[in-house]
Image (tube, rainbow, N blue to C red):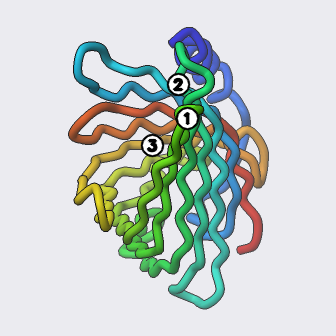
Amino acid sequence: MKRILLVLFLFPSAALAQVDSTDIRYSWFQLGHVMSTVEAPGEDMDLSGWNFSAAFAVREHVHLFADYESFEVDDFEQATGKETTLGIGAHFDLVERLSIFGRVGYYDVSADDGFATAEDDGIRAIAGLRFMPLPGYELRGGVDYVDLDLSGDDTAGFAAADIWLADGFALTGEVLFYEDGESYMVGGRFYFGD
């Protein structure tokens, strides 16, 4: 929680950066620190870890994407897990500085408590909007749906924001709310291409 407050404290000073970017790009990679709370019988679990994600525009309206996250339970470091998504997406600019996107991909998740390992896989679908209200600022929001073979399905809502600190680099943050908890991410996003 302290890290989130520190990032929020830094946002106003970052806003002083003179960045003129108004292009919504679909080629980027991102590295972030993730903190999550999962509702569990008896007591909620706090998780922390790292997320790496990337997207590569391959056609005018088509991009490939990948997402990898590793985490551990804060009070029980032997309990770890990872999530991986690989897929394809489509995007369209509705008007200048407003874009709609959708993605679908293969999703794999595993967890290890030090004694046994559990694995599951299925599909993941994401849909959302990207909007740049001012040059150097971006807002994102949408839904994230997962349907696993053994664990069933879950739908989450997400909201995210970028503040560009330099051409091609933005400070980014995201919050994800799902049925059994929530997740927060802060990190950096590196944009490339047109």
Residue visible at 47% across and 31% down in the picture:
184
- Give the side of residue 179 with respect to residue 65, left or right: left
The residue singled out by tag 3 in the image is: 160
Q: Residues within 10 Å of mark 2 (few under 14, many from 20)?
A: some
Q: How many marks?
A: 3
Mark closest to the chain's N terminus, 3 or 2: 2
> Looking at the picture, how far across and down is residue 78, in whole percent?
61, 26
Q: Amino acid at mark 2?
A: Val
> Which numbered circle lies on residue 73?
2
Say which quarter of the image contains residue 162.
top right
Decide: is 181 above or below 103: above
Mark closest to the chain's N terminus, 1 or 2: 2
Mark closest to the chain's N terminus, 1 or 3: 1
Camera-nearest label, 1 or 2: 1
Distance from the alpha carbon under mark 1 to that under mark 3: 36 Å
Q: Amino acid at mark 1?
A: Phe
- Give the side of residue 86 with respect to residue 181, left or right: right
Residue visible at 37% across and 40% down in the picture:
176
Camera-nearest label, 1 or 3: 1
> Which numbered circle lies on residue 115?
1
The secondary structure type at the circle numbered 1 is loop
Q: Quadrant of the C terminus?
A: bottom right
- Give the side of residue 132 with respect to residue 153, left or right: right
> Looking at the picture, how far across and down is residue 10, in whole percent?
64, 18
**Residue 100 seen in this snapshot:** no
Decide: is 45 above or below 33: above
